[in-house]
């Protein structure tokens, strides 16, 4: 492999809810922005069909091309507008506009001009401009002729709407609604009372939508009211009516295609459908999980979708039933559990929805599932103190999961609960085993399992600010009714009433290191005896970890005042120390490398080193401008083949890290295009089939065929060739009749081709194909891999049994000759 | 001047019967007629700051159900006693009553030309009356319906009538009197079928659309030509009880039993197309109880209901300038005095619809700081409860300054009583044999020395009676100016007993010389009606308050305005003073401080100190009581003639009892609400 420079790349998990999602004209696809990309999802299967990449900064707006509904416009902070063919995932054109683009609007009747929100010289002042897109055949077009339309608009595209096929623009900001009539070039401004009293202070506009058929503007407000404005052609005669159901801010509004209903959503997690603009006639879709941030309506009118604050898009059928959920990495809340890797699925595990742990597939960039830890209904209300999931750890290669949740109303009242979950093979999920209320008297600061393989009994250690660390052991909890196992406290340790801040097991599980503020204590995990203490008096310990593999005799610790220390456990002495303000210290469990991310004023720097030597092997300056909060090594499915010393640490695992703004980043040599799984065209073809009763029957028929195919190959019955798979027959059937030779001449060829195809397929072609597929799908999900493996197995059996039925070599040669003849005349045509 | 709170007895006025039943707006004179549930009819002049100009006392058996203007400015009402009444707006009495012979009348409507009246009766009949110059004449019965006719509306062309009944609306042809269309309503309300659907109101538009409001909570638009439902707006969970359409037919207003008033407007669907649709626009929640009636004036929405408020909500888009008319008005209390007091004996006489109550004020011996509430050493006594005979309401009442005379009047009888005090006992003796000319009085007043009684009769004449021990003598009658029969509504007598001032509803104030029994002079006419009158002691200056909040001082001996009054007119009143929304109902004077004028309206009490400079628009009008620690210089600089106190509100009556005592009668709104039937319960979010 060619050695490439390693660079930091964003690896999915971007916000899907940054802007409104867009439906394709036939409602089959949903487009949504996702960081620098635009993702194309199938609205029926929730599967990502395409990722449109090409923008160099965050995509800030997407829109269907009103003149060609198979094309998609997107605009980005990089100052370009791109036009895509979303069916094939091809970039058609790039228009270079220049300034940072915040939103794009194209009214239905606009010929070739688009409207954009750009920021002026001063920050936080935005204006709406229109740009004429030049008609040119070249791929890269300059479009810098901006003509000013409206000043002082809101940055959010929710605050601007085009009505009556682009005749007027409604823009809201603070307490103002401005309606700009494009033809008359006239602006009407409407102001709501703002300063009079407290009640009016919540009058602020939050979003706006225009009725598709009538001159009616709907605006959402901070206090939960929706106002329907009419007669806004006149500054004086304007009138509005109020719809009030939401008790908190209206986040987004959308009219249905016919305009008969208005949809609204907010923090209540309820989609409200107002029918005929009447306050009494409304329908609800409740329990959508989290705050609705955007609502969009498909042009066909059969689907809605809501984007939620937990990075989720819910596809909703017209009769208000949720039909599909596209879930990205949940980034709504602070990540207190840190990043973990589920040893079973290799999924990234972290805080998800409130009270949940999310399992997130890094390869597929989608959420696998949510594990409800707190198991209580979440009430979304301001000022309500919730139970927080604060710590979690996996033990014994994923068999056990320990979680800690806490709720603190005030300083003296702390509710703590520790739960231990066991993986049930039957249900393929975690089941609650033991619930411990108040495991400690104060906050739990760390929690770790003894993951050594030679230990028969799993052991969990918790460290707490109450000055103790507790050892929890799995014991037999059987009674006369049932056999059961449960966790119980085995040992309580403390050291001079200092707060326990960190705990960590050595790789072989024989030693436990617990840090008490500035002091590190080493305990024997057999007898729980204090073996020795290390004290650097250099500040409180922030991180603590043992080295792995060859470096297992070293113990690493970082302190709050910026010292990284390494002790040798054999000599019980300090090996080396370095001045480094480490914010993340993460050992690779599969190699002896340790990664440390340090925080400096310019940004965060990454250092990779072996504990045995103080010299870093690899330094990447400025991996991120922000503080890096968490990092984790994720084992690679296929080991990398980096030869240079600096990059060898990337061979076994990949390092992922999360910044303060919850950006998930990693190191990669591949370009993003290669990294993300391209989807096969085959899938697309399948998708494009309309779901008619006939297609259902066809699908069933195909499944049966496949089953029969597998069955026959296993039982080794005579295999009927599938006619469409044989190229000779395909070409025979597709050649025009007037150029075909006589039927009698073709007959023997035809039969021969049938014979041949069966033999070649079973002997040579299929294994090759499988290999190729294997390579292609090497970085797709595990399930697919399993499938391919199975396929390989079946093929192997095929091969083995085929030997018995093999034709003699001479016969085979003859048949091949026939095939060659067959092809030559066809290609000559 | 230190202020002590002395009053501490509370009074309950009977308000149950005071709810507004119907309103009728007259476009020509810009007047509003309001009828209450007890049959009282009030006329408000919308051009004169919504002043309650005239009123007709109620009658127990006359529950008004419908009110309308016809033939220009003739006012008719109909009620559950089956009679149609016409009111004499000049003489302030009922012209005649005519039985319609159809049982209780539920609805009445005047034709667009005003020459015909149609009434809907309990027995399902719709009767047409011709309005003749003197009376009304029964013309024809329309096709009789099965159930009572609750609402009626004329087509603007006068050719058809829509009648709302129970469960259906019928359309009549006026010429033939036959029913040409019947539209049946749906009883469903949010999936629940109600036992019946009452059509509380209908409105016929010129394009043939009929708008109906019903007990199911819907506003529905029907095409009367085809009898089909065009559009239905579900707006309330309870009854929609009233509807009124603007003359231009571009907006209408409906009132619901939940106290909400909804405005509907005809707006064009898009700016380019001519297609228009009715859209519900703004809801207004100014009432706590049923909105029984609504009216639509060209510039305002008017609503009234069980909670006794009359609410006038201006349409901002129709109001050209921001002035008095642009603000929301809520009229709760009558614009006249219902309380009189006897200063010498410290008595208060309260006037109710059917009885009078006489109370003696308590007193205290304690002293205290400014603002303290002092304990009463003697509690207030309820001395007398005087019930009227007959079904009629009391029009006016008065107690003499010495406390030994009480006079009151109903629409047909005048009563005079002599009170005798013997220690704690009180004896009441009615003065019998009232003269024939004393049938009904609009205003009664005793002279300061209680020896004369002044009665303003509804025929426009003023009678002066000389009171003797237990009897009286007719002294003189001032006949009205030739040609007018306008009743005098307000009287004021000078403390020395030499002068009597009287004002009518529209003409100026006349001043009579009581010694020579002749007209002394007439104060120059002013556009706005007089709301309060008083003559100052010693100087004999007549102070007149008008409904536009102007206050004039007229010197009776000099027959001209005083210098102070001229100065005030030259500079003008403060902007905020002119924007006050309730009229001044009482003026009094301090016996020892001739420069002070005391006056009050329902929400403030004011002392005008003529010695101080007048405030201009830049100074603060409403100054709180001056803090003591401020320097004198600052106080002098900011002091102006108007000392306003808003401690007591709503204030029904305030007067000086003596130099050191002031009596104030407050009527808390909560008490009125508490006596009303409970409103429709609505779930409030977060409770």
Image (tube, rainbow, N blue to C red):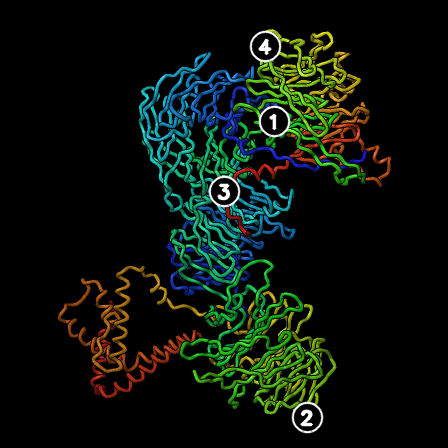
Nearer to us: label 3 or label 1:
1
Front residue (pair B273, B409): B409
In the picture as drawn, the residue positioned furthest to the bottom comes out as A571
Indicate which label's residue lies in the foreground, 4 or 1: 1
Subunit under mark 3:
B
Q: Judge if badges 3 and 2 mark residues of a common chain.
A: no
Q: Earlier in the sequence, mark 4 or mark 1?
A: 1
Callout 1: chain? B
Residue sitting at the far left: A744
What's the CA distance linking mark 1 and mark 2?
A: 112 Å
Chain under disc 4? B
Q: Nearer the viewer, mark 3 or mark 2?
A: 3
**Local secondary structure at mark 3:** loop
Residue A824 in the figure: left or right of residue A99: left
Compare marks 3 and 1 and give the one earlier in the sequence.
1
- Badge 3 and badge 1 both on one subunit: yes
Can you see residue B513? yes
Residue B386, numbered circle: 1
How far apart are the alpha carbons under marks 3 and 1? 36 Å
Residue at image mark 2: A571
Element on which disc 1 rests? strand
Say whether mark 2 and mark 1 are on the same chain: no
Label 4, label 3: how far apart the Cα atoms are: 49 Å
Tag 3 residue: B680
**Marks 2/4: CA distance?**
125 Å
Labels 2 and 4 share a subunit: no
Mark 4–mark 1 Cα distance, whole angstroms, equals 35 Å
Decide: is A583 above or below B185. below
Q: Are marks 1 and 2 in contact (CB under 8 Å)?
A: no
Residue under pointer 4: B484
| Dot 2 alpha-carbon crowd within 10 angstroms: few under 14, some 14 to 19, many 20 or more | few
């Amino acid at each position: 492999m060619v050695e490439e420079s390693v660079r930091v790349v964003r690896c999915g998990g971007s916000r899907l809810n940054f802007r409104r999602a867009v439906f394709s004209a036939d409602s089959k696809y949903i487009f949504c922005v996702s960081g620098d990309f635009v993702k194309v999802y199938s609205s029926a299967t929730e599967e990502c069909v395409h990722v449109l990449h090409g923008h160099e900064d965050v995509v800030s707006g997407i829109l269907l091309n009103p003149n060609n509904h198979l094309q998609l416009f997107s605009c980005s902070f990089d100052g370009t507008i791109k036009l895509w063919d979303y069916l094939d995932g091809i970039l058609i054109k790039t228009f270079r506009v220049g300034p940072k683009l915040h939103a794009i609007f194209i009214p239905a009747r606009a010929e070739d001009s688009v409207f954009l929100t750009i920021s002026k010289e001063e920050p936080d002042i935005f204006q709406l401009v229109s740009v004429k897109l030049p008609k040119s055949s070249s791929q890269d077009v300059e479009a810098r002729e901006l003509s000013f339309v409206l000043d002082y608009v809101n940055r959010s595209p929710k605050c601007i709407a085009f009505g009556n096929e682009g005749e007027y623009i409604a823009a809201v900001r603070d307490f103002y609604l401005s309606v700009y009539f494009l033809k008359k070039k006239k602006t009407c401004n409407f102001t709501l009372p703002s300063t009079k009293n407290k009640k009016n202070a919540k009058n602020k506009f939050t979003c706006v939508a225009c009725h598709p058929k009538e001159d009616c503007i709907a605006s959402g407000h901070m206090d939960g009211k929706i106002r329907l404005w009419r007669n806004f052609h006149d500054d004086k005669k304007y009138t509005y009516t109020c719809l009030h159901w939401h008790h908190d801010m209206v986040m987004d509004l959308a009219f249905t295609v016919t305009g008969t209903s208005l949809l609204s959503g907010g923090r209540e997690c309820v989609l409200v459908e107002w029918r005929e603009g009447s306050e009494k006639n409304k329908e609800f879709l409740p329990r959508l999980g989290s705050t609705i941030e955007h609502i969009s309506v498909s042009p066909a009118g059969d689907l809605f979708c809501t984007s939620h604050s937990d990075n989720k898009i819910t596809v909703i059928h017209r009769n208000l039933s949720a039909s599909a959920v596209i879930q990205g990495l949940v980034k709504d809340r602070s990540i207190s559990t840190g990043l973990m890797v589920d040893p079973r699925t290799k999924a990234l595990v972290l805080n998800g929805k409130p009270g949940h742990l999310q399992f997130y597939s890094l390869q597929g960039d989608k959420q696998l599932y949510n594990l409800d830890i707190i198991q209580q209904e979440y009430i979304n209300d301001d000022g309500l103190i919730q139970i927080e999931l604060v710590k979690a750890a996996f033990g014994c290669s994923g068999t056990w999961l320990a979680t800690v949740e806490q709720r603190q109303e005030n300083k003296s009242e702390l509710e703590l609960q520790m739960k231990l979950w066991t993986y049930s093979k039957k249900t393929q999920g975690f089941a609650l085993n033991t619930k411990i209320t108040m495991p400690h008297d104060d906050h739990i600061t760390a929690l770790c399992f003894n993951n050594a393989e030679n230990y028969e009994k799993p052991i969990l250690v918790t460290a707490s600010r109450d000055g103790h660390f507790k050892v929890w052991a799995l014991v037999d909890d059987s009674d006369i009714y049932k056999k059961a196992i449960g966790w119980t406290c085995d040992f309580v340790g403390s050291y001079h009433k200092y707060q326990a801040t960190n705990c960590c097991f050595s790789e072989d599980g024989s030693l436990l290191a617990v840090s008490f503020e500035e002091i590190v204590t080493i305990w024997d995990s057999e007898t729980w005896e204090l073996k020795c203490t290390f004290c650097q008096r250099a500040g409180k310990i922030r991180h603590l970890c043992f080295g792995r593999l060859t470096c297992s005799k070293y113990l690493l610790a970082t302190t709050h005042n910026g010292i990284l220390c390494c002790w040798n456990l054999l000599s019980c002495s300090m090996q080396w120390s370095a001045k480094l303000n480490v914010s993340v210290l993460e050992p690779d469990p599969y190699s002896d490398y340790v990664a440390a991310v340090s925080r400096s004023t310019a940004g965060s720097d990454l250092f990779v080193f072996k504990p045995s030597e103080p010299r870093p092997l690899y330094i990447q300056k400025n991996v991120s401008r922000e503080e890096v909060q968490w990092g984790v090594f994720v084992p690679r499915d296929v080991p990398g083949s980096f030869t240079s010393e600096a990059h060898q640490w990337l061979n076994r695992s990949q390092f992922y890290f999360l910044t303060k703004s919850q950006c998930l980043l990693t190191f990669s040599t591949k370009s993003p295009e290669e990294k993300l799984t391209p989807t096969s065209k085959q899938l697309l073809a399948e998708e494009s089939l309309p779901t008619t009763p006939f297609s259902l029957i066809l699908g069933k028929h195909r499944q049966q065929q496949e089953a029969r195919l597998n069955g026959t190959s296993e039982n080794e019955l005579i295999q009927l060739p599938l006619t469409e798979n044989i190229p000779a027959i395909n070409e025979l059937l597709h050649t025009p009749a007037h150029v075909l030779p006589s039927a009698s001449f073709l007959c023997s060829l035809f039969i021969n081709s049938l014979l041949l195809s069966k033999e070649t397929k079973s002997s040579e072609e299929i294994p090759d194909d499988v290999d190729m597929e294997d390579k292609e799908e090497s970085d797709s999900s595990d399930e697919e891999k399993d499938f391919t493996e199975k396929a390989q197995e079946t093929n192997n059996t095929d091969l083995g049994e085929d030997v018995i039925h093999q034709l003699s070599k001479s016969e085979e040669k003859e048949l091949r000759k026939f095939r060659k003849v067959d092809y030559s005349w066809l290609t000559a045509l | 001047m230190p202020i002590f709170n002395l009053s501490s007895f509370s009074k309950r006025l009977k308000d149950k019967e005071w709810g507004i039943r119907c309103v009728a707006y007259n476009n020509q004179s810009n007047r509003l007629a309001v009828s209450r549930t007890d049959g009282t009819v009030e006329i408000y002049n919308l051009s004169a700051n919504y002043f309650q100009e005239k009123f007709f006392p109620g009658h127990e058996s006359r529950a008004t159900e419908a009110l309308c203007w016809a033939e220009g400015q003739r006012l008719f009402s109909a009620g559950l006693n089956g009679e149609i009444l016409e009111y004499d707006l000049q003489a302030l009495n009922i012209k005649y009553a005519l039985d319609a012979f159809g049982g209780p009348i539920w609805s009445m409507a005047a034709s667009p030309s005003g020459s015909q009246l149609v009434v809907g009766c309990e027995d399902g009949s719709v009767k047409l009356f011709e309005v003749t110059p003197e009376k009304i004449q029964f013309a024809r019965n329309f096709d009789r319906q099965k159930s009572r006719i609750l609402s009626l509306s004329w087509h603007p062309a006068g050719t058809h009538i829509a009648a709302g009944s129970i469960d259906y609306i019928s359309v009549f042809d006026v010429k033939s009197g036959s029913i040409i269309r019947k539209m049946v309503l749906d009883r469903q309300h949010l999936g629940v079928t109600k036992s019946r659907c009452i059509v509380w109101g209908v409105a016929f538009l010129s394009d043939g659309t009929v708008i109906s409001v019903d007990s199911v909570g819907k506003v529905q638009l029907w095409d009367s030509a085809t009898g089909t439902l065009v559009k239905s707006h579900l707006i309330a969970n309870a009854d929609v009880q009233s509807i009124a359409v603007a003359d231009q037919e571009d907006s209408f207003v409906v009132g619901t039993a939940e106290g909400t008033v909804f405005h509907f407007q005809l707006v064009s669907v898009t700016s380019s197309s001519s297609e228009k649709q009715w859209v519900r626009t703004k809801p207004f929640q100014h009432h706590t109880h049923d909105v029984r009636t609504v009216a639509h004036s060209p510039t305002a929405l008017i609503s009234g209901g069980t909670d006794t408020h009359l609410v006038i909500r201006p349409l901002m888009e129709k109001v050209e300038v921001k002035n008095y008319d642009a603000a929301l008005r809520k009229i709760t209390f009558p614009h006249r005095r219902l309380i009189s007091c006897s200063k010498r004996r410290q008595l208060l006489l309260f006037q109710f619809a059917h009885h009078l109550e006489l109370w003696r004020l308590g007193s205290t011996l304690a002293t205290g700081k400014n603002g303290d509430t002092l304990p009463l050493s003697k509690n207030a006594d309820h001395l007398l409860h005087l019930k009227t005979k007959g079904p009629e309401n009391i029009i006016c009442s008065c107690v003499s300054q010495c406390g030994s005379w009480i006079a009151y009047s109903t629409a047909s009888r005048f009563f005079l009583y002599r009170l005798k005090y013997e220690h704690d006992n009180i004896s009441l003796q009615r003065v019998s044999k009232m003269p024939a000319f004393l049938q009904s009085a609009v205003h009664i007043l005793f002279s300061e020395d209680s020896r004369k009684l002044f009665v303003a009769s509804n025929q426009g004449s003023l009678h002066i009676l000389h009171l003797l021990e237990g009897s009286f003598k007719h002294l003189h009658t001032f006949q009205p100016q030739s040609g007018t029969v306008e009743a005098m509504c307000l009287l004021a007598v000078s403390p020395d007993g030499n002068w009597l001032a009287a004002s009518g509803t529209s003409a100026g104030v006349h001043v009579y010389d009581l010694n020579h029994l002749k007209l002394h002079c007439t104060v120059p006419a002013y556009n706005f009606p007089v709301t309060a009158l008083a003559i100052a002691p010693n100087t004999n200056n007549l102070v007149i308050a008008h409904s536009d909040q102007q206050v004039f001082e007229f010197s009776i001996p000099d027959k001209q305005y005083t210098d102070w009054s001229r100065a005030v007119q030259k500079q003008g009143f403060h902007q905020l003073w002119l924007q006050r929304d309730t009229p001044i109902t009482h003026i009094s004077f301090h016996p020892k401080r001739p420069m002070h004028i005391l006056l009050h309206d329902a929400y403030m009490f004011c002392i005008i100190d003529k010695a101080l400079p007048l405030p201009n628009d830049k100074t603060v009008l409403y100054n709180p009581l001056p803090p003591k620690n401020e320097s004198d210089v600052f106080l002098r600089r900011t002091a102006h003639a108007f000392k306003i106190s808003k401690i007591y509100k709503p204030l029904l009556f305030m007067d000086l009892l003596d130099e050191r005592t002031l009596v104030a009668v407050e009527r808390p709104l909560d008490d009125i609400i508490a006596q009303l039937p409970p409103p429709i319960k609505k779930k409030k979010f977060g409770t």
